[in-house]
Image: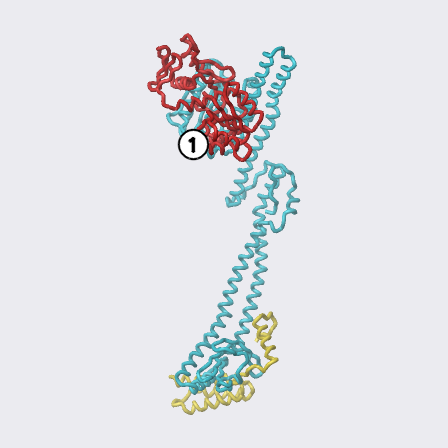
Amino acid sequence: MRILVVEDDRDVAGFVLKGLREAGHVVEHAGNGRDGLFMAASEGFDAIILDRMLPGGIDGLRLLETLRSQNNNTPVLFLSAMAQVDDRVRGLKAGGDDYLTKPFAFAELLARVEALTRRGKSEGPATRLCVGDLEMDLLSRTVKRGGAKIDLQPREFRLLEYLMRHAGQVVTRTMLLEGVWDYHFDPQTNVIDVHVSRLRQKVDKPFPSPLIHTVRNAGYMLRHDG
Amino acid sequence: MDQATPPATLGTAAPPVARHRQSGFIRSAGLRFAILYAFLFGASALALALFLWWATAGLLDRQTDAAIRADAQGLAERWEEGGITALIATIQERLAENVDDDAIYLLVDRDLNRIAGNLNRWPNGVTMDREWFELPIERPGLRSLARIQRFDLHGGFHLLVGRDVQVRAQMRRLLTDALLWGVVMVLVLGTAGALVVRGVFRRALATISATAAAISAGDLSRRVPLSGRSDEFDRLAETINEMLDRIGRLMDGVRQVSNAIAHDLRTPITRARARLEDATRNAQSAADLHAAIERAQADLDGIVAVFHALLRIAEIEAGTRRSAFADLDLAPLLADLAELYGAVAEERGLRLELDWPEALPVLGDRELIQQAVANLLDNAIKFSPPGGIVRLSATGGMPVRIVVADQGPGIAAADRERATERFFRAEAARHTPGSGLGLALVQAVAQLHGGTLLLADNGPGLSAELELA
Amino acid sequence: MPQSVHMRLSPAVGAMLAGLALMGQAPAALVTTDTPDYCVQLRTLVGQEVHAAPVTPPPEVQLLSDEGQHMCDQGKVRGGIARLRRALVLMHQMQAK
C-alpha cells in the first residue's frame, strides 16, 4: 500500500515510517501541514496517517477538510495527543475514518491502517462472507463450517462477522470493542479475550484447522491457512 | 467594590488592606453609583427649577408681552378706523384709564417730534420696526425699565407701545435668585444623598467583599452570609457560595491528584525503571532483554492508562460535557454491557442477574454512563468469589438508579467515604490489579449528571448505586 | 422694593450696563404722566365728564377725584394720579352701562 504519514515529531515519524516499511508498505512523509496537503492532493495514496497538531498554519483538521472539499476520499487515520471525546468526534466529522490517541502501540496503528484500506474496497453490499470453509450468510444470519451449521448468539455472530470482514488483517481488541460493542475506552479486564475464546469453542474447536489466530501483542486475525 | 480584581490563582496572600489603598478612588463603583444618583437628582431638580421659572417669571414676561400686543392691536384698529386723530385720542384715553400706571406710549412724526403718549422723547437705540426693546426710563425721582415694541405707520409716524416692567423685572430677579440658590441647595443635598447611597452600596457589598478577601487570603471554608431577605444580594451571595463549594471540590480533587500522583504513580514508574535497569545489568541473552523490554512496555502502558483515566475524570469534573447530553434509553445500553461482561462472569463461575424495565429514558452522556457502569461491573466481577452472584439492576424515574451488587468482601463502612477518592485502595484491595480510579470516575460521572454514587453493604458484599438525575 | 441685599444677576447687570452706557449719552426718556400737570389734566377731565354725564355719577367718583387732587397737591403724585384714573374708569364704566 502507498501510505502518507503527516507527522511533525521526528521520533514518532521515524518510528512509524520504519514500522510501515517493514510491514511492506510504500511510505511517504510530510513534516508539516502545507507539505502534507500538497502531497496528499497531488499524489494518490491508499491511506493517510495524519497528526492533529501540525505546525505551519495548517493543522490536521484543516488539511482534511480541504482534502474532502476537493472530493479526495482517501481514507485518513488521525493521530492525536488529545484524548477528549469531542476531539475524536470532531475529527470524524471533518471526514476522518479512524482516530488513534498517542501513545499508541504500533501494532494497533498497523492493524487500523490496513483495516482502513480494506474498508474502502469492499463497500458493496455483500450477502455472504467466506473464509476457507467458513461461510456466513448475512441475510439469514446463519453460519456454516464445512457444511455444518454453527449455532451462534447474536453478539457472537457480529464478532465473527467483524473478523471475517477483516480476514487476513490484524484486528486489535480495541477495534473489536469499538466495532462490535460500540465501546470507546479501555476496560480493565480482558473481556474481549473471553468472548473470542467462546467463539473459538464454537468455530474452531470442533474442526481440524483453526481459523481464529492470536497475534501476539496485537490482537486476533481470522485467516485460512490453506 | 473598592478592591482591585482578585488574583487569578487562589491562595495568594496579598493582604486586602494594602490593595484597598492601591485602588484608585475613581474606580470605586460605589462612587460611580453615587455620582449617578447625584446627577439624576440634580438633573431632576434643575428641570423642576427651570419649569418653575418658566411658570412664574416666564409667565410674567409672557403676560406682559401679551398685554402689549393686545394693546397694540387695539390701537391699530383705531388707527385703521379713524386715522391719526383717533389714535391720539385713544392713547390719551388709555393713559387716563391706566390705574396700574404701567402703560407706555409714544407717537411721533417723521422727525421724531412727540405727538402723543407719555414719554418725553424718542429713546435711543429703538431702531427697527416691529422689534421689541427693553430700555431704562425715568420717572420723576425713580429709575424704571420699560418693555416696548416699535411700530412704523403710514405717513411717517412711529409708535411705541409698551409696559413698565420694573416691578416684574425685580420679581424676575427675585425668582431667579431663589431658584439658583435652590440649585445650590440641590447640589449640596445631592452630594449628601450621593454619599449616603454610596455608603448603603458599600455596606451591602461589604459582607461579600470581606468574605471574598478572606477567601483570597486562603481561607476557603468561608461563605458569604445571607441577610435572609432573599433579595438580589442574597441571590448573588448564594451563587457565590455555590461557586465556592465547587471550587472547594475542585481544589480537593487537585490536591488528591497531586498526592496520589506523588505516591501511587511513582510506584509503577519506579518498578518499570528498576526492571529496565536490572535487565541492562543482568540480562544474559537477547531473549532476556526482549522480555524485559516488553514488561517495561506493559508497565508504561499501565501508567498511560492511569493518566488517561485521570484526564477523563478531570474532563468530566470540569463539566463541559454536560452540553453534549442527549436523550437516551439505558435499557439497551445495560443489555450490551451485561452481554459484554456476561462472558467474563461465566468464565469465573459467577452468575449475572439482570433486572430493569423495558425502557429507561434518561438525559445524559452515553459513553460516560457506559464507562461508569462498566467500571462498577468490572469491580464486582473482580472482587466476587467463585459461585457468587453479581446483580445489575436499574429503576427509572427521577432519579434513575443503576445498582451493581456483588457478594465479595465489600468495603468497610469506614472506608466507604473515601472510596471515591482518586487512587484510594482499601487495605483489602491493595494488591488487586487496578489503579483505584474506577470509583472516582463513577462518582464524577454521577455528579456531572446531577446525581451521586452511593455505596452500601450488600450483606455480604458491596452495593454500588449510581444515581442519575 | 427689596434692594440689592442678595445676589443680582445678569438682567440687573445688563440694566446697569445699559444705564452706564446711557450715562455717557443723552438721559433716558422721561415718563410724562407722573407730573402734577398731569394731575390737573386728569382732574379737569373728570370734571368735564361729570358735568356731561346724563346721570348723577356715584359719590366715589367725586371722592376719588378730590382725594386724587389732594394727594397731588401734597406731592404724592403717583398716588393722586392713580386715584384720578380710578375715578375716570368708574365714570366710563357707568357710561358704558
Please say if B226 is above or below B186.
above
Letter of the cyan chain: B
Name the image colouring. Answer: by chain
**Residue A56: which quarter of the image?**
top right
Q: Is residue B262 above or below residue B278?
A: below
Rendered shade, chain A: red
Residue labelled with disc 1: A71
Regarding mark 1 in the picture, which secondary structure is present there?
Answer: loop
Quadrant that contains the C terminus of chain B: top left
Amino acid carrying label 1: it is Asn
In the image, farthest residue toward the left:
A140
Q: Which chain is tinted yellow?
A: C
Give the percent coordinates (x, y) of residue B108.
49, 85
Q: Exactly how many numbered labels are in the figure?
A: 1
> Which residue is rendered at x = 63% and y = 10% of the image?
B284
Residue in the picture at 45% in, 74% down: B66
